[in-house]
Structure formats: C-alpha cells, structure tokens
Amino acid sequence: MEGLADFYVRQALTDIGGFDWCVTEFVRVSGTLLPPKTFYRWCPELRTGARTRAGTSVHVQLLGSDPQCMAENAARAAELGAPAIDLNFGCPAKTVNRHRGGAVLLDEPEVVHQVVAAVRNAVPKHLPVSAKMRLGNCHGDFAVENARAIEAAGASWLTVHGRTKVQGYKPPAYWDQIALLRHAIAIPVIANGEIWTADDAHRCAQESQCDMLMLGRGAVSDPFLAQRIQQGSTADWADVRASLLKFIEDCLPTSTDLQLAGRLKQWMNYLRRDWPQAQTLYDVIKRCKSSADIAMHIESSTDIAA
Ligand SMILES: Cc1cc2nc3c(=O)[nH]c(=O)nc-3n(C[C@H](O)[C@H](O)[C@H](O)COP(=O)(O)O)c2cc1C
C-alpha cells in the first residue's frame, strides 16, 4: 500500500508472521525504463533475495498503461531478483488515473489484456505475473471481461478488491461480486477488502468463495491479524508494543525524529481502530519532541489503559 506498507512496515508485519508473501507499494511506470536504484528504493528487499528479514517473499508491483514500457520495466525488476510481478489495475488516485494508470484502465479491458500479456512475455516463464483489480472504474459491468482478459493474457492469479473506483474505500466491500469472478475464470482469485478481523476473513472467504485472501489496512490496524486468521493468535497490546519498539529501533538509523514521529503517527492512526492504547499514544506522540521520548511513552503504555 503506497505510503503505508513500505519496507519498514513490511518488515515489522512479516516479522510477526502469517503472510504467504507481500507486495511492494506500486512502482509507477510512465514512459521510461526506470533505473535499478528506483526498484531498490521501492523494494530494498531486492538486495536480500527479495525477502523480508523474516524470509517472506516480496513481489514487485508495477502500475502503468503502456504495454511495451511495462514489459521492459517488469523484465528489469525480474533481472534485479523480483520473484513475481504484480500489476496494479486498482489505484483510484486522480493523479495516477489522469495518466491512464490504475483503476481507469478497467474501462478498457483490451488495454488491460495488452499490459498483462506484454509483461507475461517479457518475464521469465518461471516467474509468476499476477494482477490486482477493483470491480470496475465507475461501474462493475466490465468486471468479468477484465478478469477474463487478465486470465487470457497469462496471469497466474488475480487479486480482486471488491469495490469499484467510485466506491472508494467506503464499506462494504462486495465479497459476493468477487465470487462471480472466481467462477468466471480458472486461475486462482484472491479476495480483498474490509477484512479487519478473523471473523471478517471467514465471512469474506465464504461469500467470495475464495480460499486465499489479501489483507490491506486490517493488517496495519491489527499487526497480528494474519496470524489470528491462520492460527487463532491471542496476541495482546504487550505484543503490539514490542513490535512498535522494534519498529522504532529499525527505523532510527535512517530517520530523523520528525520522520519517525510521522511514521508512528500514521501507524497509530490505523492501530487506534483496534487498540484504545494506540489512541492515547497517538495523542501523546503529537506532542513528542524526540524519538527517545516516543519510545519511552510506548514502553510505558500498558493494557490498563484499555
Ligand atoms: C493508503 C493506501 C495505499 C494503497 N496503495 C496500494 C498500492 O500501492 N497497491 C495496491 O495494489 N493497492 C493499494 N491500496 C489498496 C489496498 O491494497 C486494498 O486493496 C484496499 O485498501 C482494500 O483492502 P482493505 O480494506 O483490506 O484495506 C492502497 C490502499 C490504501 C488505503
């Protein structure tokens, strides 16, 4: 997730575990072959075998509409060690959509097909190419057509966020609509959208009829969510607090106090959905002047505040 699930957050979440793989924020492709340093910036894990510290595989996600240029950049990502290439057809951002990237392409299933096919042809056969789509841009009328276009172009699997672009991030996510796509194509479909609890995950699996799920914001608001879904983890605030302290330790060498406070405020903003302790910390961090101060407040936050 752009601006959210960066290297440090991926590292923190996969340290906790429960994920089969994770995906980078999107790398925007617009007209040029990006230099290796750009890929390393978005996916520092390429320097460590495309795995996070815990060993979880990291797929590289590309966003763009020019088949040839997407293909060249996918080939470069593969050369640099990406274990799989994911293609973004779901981003709702105006700046991205204005340049024919992300969810607007769902109005043009033939372009979606061309992009996936060009990337598939450019990347070694043993590396999976996957796609991520919403149900549509302004409506869901082309959902099946897009899913079929993606399958016909040779994608290995398809992740579906169960909303159109105009539906934004407003609940609900239409898991039942994902089931229609699941039955329209033969490649695996991964269901995504509004999974905040283990119970949501089970209902989503049932309604979408998908046995694979993708977690987005839910994994940030409850870092133990993947584990809870897979193994019924009973992690509590003390466990979250330990992850936060490790996160600070990891970020410190490359962040100023201001940057670290910004990162923590952003994470706390999601955490406070599930953890009342995070609300208290969110308010405190706004006034903190140094990272030592922040760490001290996190360390002393207790379950009693709940
Ligand atoms: C801040 C933010 C950034 C996102 N960036 C990306 C992205 O780079 N690539 C992508 O495929 N989806 C991105 N998404 C969409 C999520 O992957 C996911 O599809 C969406 O949030 C719905 O799932 P959720 O309800 O589990 O969060 C982003 C979502 C948010 C909130």
Image (cartoon, rainbow, N blue to C red):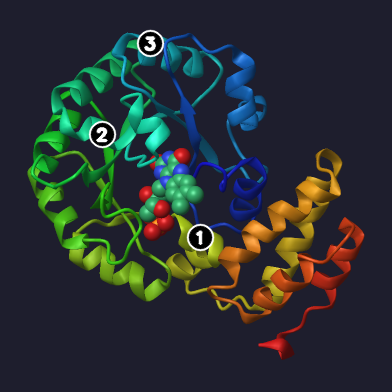
Residue placed at 10% from the left, 41% from the top?
144
Q: What label does residue 104 carry, if any?
A: 2
Q: Real-space Cα distance between discs 3 and 1?
A: 32 Å
The structure residue drawn at horizontal position 15% and vertical position 49%, both measured from the top left corner, is 182
SS for dot 1: helix
- Which one is in front in this view, the residue at disc 1 or the one at disc 2? 2
Residue 258 versus residue 200 in the image, above or below: above
Please tell me how crowded label 2 is: few (under 14), some (14-19), or many (20+) other residues with Cα within 10 Å.
many
Q: Residue 292, percent across and down? A: 91, 60
Q: Position of residue 293 (x, y in %)?
A: 90, 64
Residue located 55% across and 60% down the image: 220
Q: Is mark 1 within 8 Å of ligand 1?
A: yes
The quarter of the rendered structure image containing the C terminus is bottom right
In the displayed structure, does residue 15 sit left or right of residue 25?
Answer: right
Q: Amino acid at mark 1?
A: Ala
Q: Earlier in the sequence, mark 3 or mark 1?
A: 3
Q: Quadrant of residue 205?
A: bottom left
Q: Helix or strand or loop: what does disc 3 sit on?
A: helix
- The residue that mark 1 highlights is 219
Closer mark to the observer between disc 3 and disc 1: 3
What is the three-letter code of the residue carrying label 2?
A: Val
- Quarter assignment of residue 167: bottom left
For this orientation, the residue located farthest to the bottom is: 304
Label 1 or label 2, whichever comes before in sequence order? 2
Using a 10 Å C-alpha cutoff, classify the residue at mark 1 as few (fewer than 14 neighbours), some (14 to 19) or many (20 or more). Answer: many
